[in-house]
Image (spheres, helix red, strand yellow):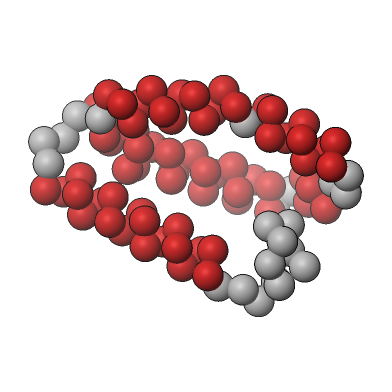
Amino acid sequence: MAAHGAPSGSVWLPGCLSSFSGLAARDFAQMERTWAGWALIVGVPLVWALKTGLLVFNSNGRKAVSGIDTDAGWRKIGYARLPIAATLLIITALA
């Protein structure tokens, strides 16, 4: 099982995320561009790609993530991501 609870060969999650990203990019191309729109369409994916790349190519990072095996550990990660979710919500409202 992968970290998201689906078998490791599952492609539905990346497929859904890619579809939503494509729809958002299409809407962005058809609307007036704002700084918040640019942040959501270009900035967020670039930052997440950079973060993912740094984690994948860092052996300590891979060990830390694969070592999370308790509910408390995942809950701690969820709480740490709440400010990010709030920031994305504000940027989305401004876009």
Instruction: Give the vertical position of 33 relative to 24 (above or below).
Output: above
Tag count: 0
Instruction: Give the vertical position of 85 relative to 70 (above or below).
Output: above
Residue drawn at (76%, 35%) of the image: 75
Foreground residue among 9 and 57: 9
Indicate the quadrant where residue 13 lies. bottom right
Indicate the quadrant where residue 32 lies. top left
Tell me, yes or no, if residue 59 can be seen here.
no
Instruction: Give the vertical position of 74 relative to 57 (above or below).
Output: above
Answer left or right for 25 relative to 5.
left
Tell me, yes or no, if residue 52 can be seen here.
yes
Answer left or right for 29 relative to 75.
left
Looking at the picture, how far across and down is residue 1, in whole percent?
Answer: 77, 68
Looking at the picture, how far across and down is residue 43, in whole percent?
Answer: 38, 37
Looking at the picture, how far across and down is residue 30, in whole percent?
Answer: 11, 48
Q: Most extreme residue toward the bottom, as rendered?
A: 9
Quarter of the C terminus within the rendering:
top left
Residue drawn at (68%, 27%) of the image: 80
Residue drawn at (68%, 67%) of the image: 6
Answer left or right for 40 relative to 14.
left
Residue drawn at (41%, 61%) of the image: 18
Looking at the picture, how far across and down is residue 93, in whole percent?
Answer: 31, 26
